[in-house]
Image (cartoon, rainbow, N blue to C red):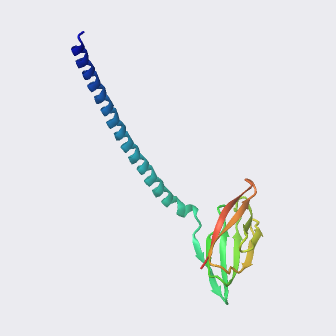
């Protein structure tokens, strides 16, 4: 084959190769866009799902009643914890925990900043007394004796 024909054949091959690379790049870009769309769809679905499920799992807030200068509140204890409570700083709180028959494996609750450390027993009521002096959100944890770990029990919201 003459060198002129060989050069023409090489140019044709280079052109075909360039077209293949361009097509592959276009396909990769398309796949990348598709993957982004899929990720966005998954994230949106997760947010919608969590938005629907979180109110079921999370404890709802319950304002304590101010009676004679003392906040009084009773919450029902379940295997998933207790409802969050809302009080104001500087006032004494009397929190009654109504432990039904199905409190699961919860054996005690703790919150160091508010000096809460209480054993719980299914079928009994326990009353805690404390005075939160600082505003904030105080997470109360429960001890789960079967899995040897602490779990969020509720949040005390001090305003």
Res 70 → quadrant: bottom right
Q: Position of residue 14 (x, y in %)?
A: 29, 24
Quarter placement of the N terminus: top left
Q: Is residue 4 above or below residue 25?
A: above
Res 65 → quadrant: bottom right
Residue shown at 58% from the left, 64% from the top: 58
**Residue with the most extreme bottom position:** 68
Q: In the shown orientation, is residue 159 left or right of residue 131?
A: left
Can residue 81 be seen here? The reply is no
Q: Is residue 126 above or below residue 22?
A: below
Q: Position of residue 115 (x, y in %)?
A: 75, 73
Can residue 98 be seen here? The reply is yes
Res 159 → quadrant: bottom right
Residue shown at 52% from the left, 59% from the top: 53
Q: Is residue 143 above or below residue 20?
A: below
Q: In the shown orientation, is residue 136 left or right of residue 125?
A: left
Q: Is residue 94 above or below residue 53?
A: below
Q: Position of residue 25 (x, y in %)?
A: 34, 35
Q: Position of residue 94 (x, y in %)?
A: 70, 80
Residue shown at 67% from the left, 84% from the top: 90
Q: In the shown orientation, is residue 29 left or right of residue 123?
A: left
């Amino acid at each position: 084959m003459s060198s002129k024909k060989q050069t023409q054949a090489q140019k044709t091959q280079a052109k075909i190769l360039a077209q293949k690379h361009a097509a592959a790049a276009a396909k990769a870009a398309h796949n990348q866009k598709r993957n982004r769309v899929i990720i966005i769809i998954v994230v949106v679905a997760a947010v919608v799902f969590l938005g629907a499920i979180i109110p079921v799992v999370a404890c709802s807030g319950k304002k304590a009643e101010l009676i004679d200068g003392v906040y009084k509140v009773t919450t029902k204890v379940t295997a998933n914890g207790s409802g969050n409570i809302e009080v104001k700083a500087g006032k004494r709180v009397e929190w009654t925990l109504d432990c039904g028959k199905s409190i699961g494996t919860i054996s005690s609750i703790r919150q160091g900043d508010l000096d809460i450390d209480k054993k719980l027993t299914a079928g009994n009521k326990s009353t805690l007394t404390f005075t939160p002096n600082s505003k904030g959100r105080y997470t109360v944890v429960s001890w789960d004796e079967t899995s040897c770990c602490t779990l969020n029990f509720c949040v005390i919201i001090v305003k």
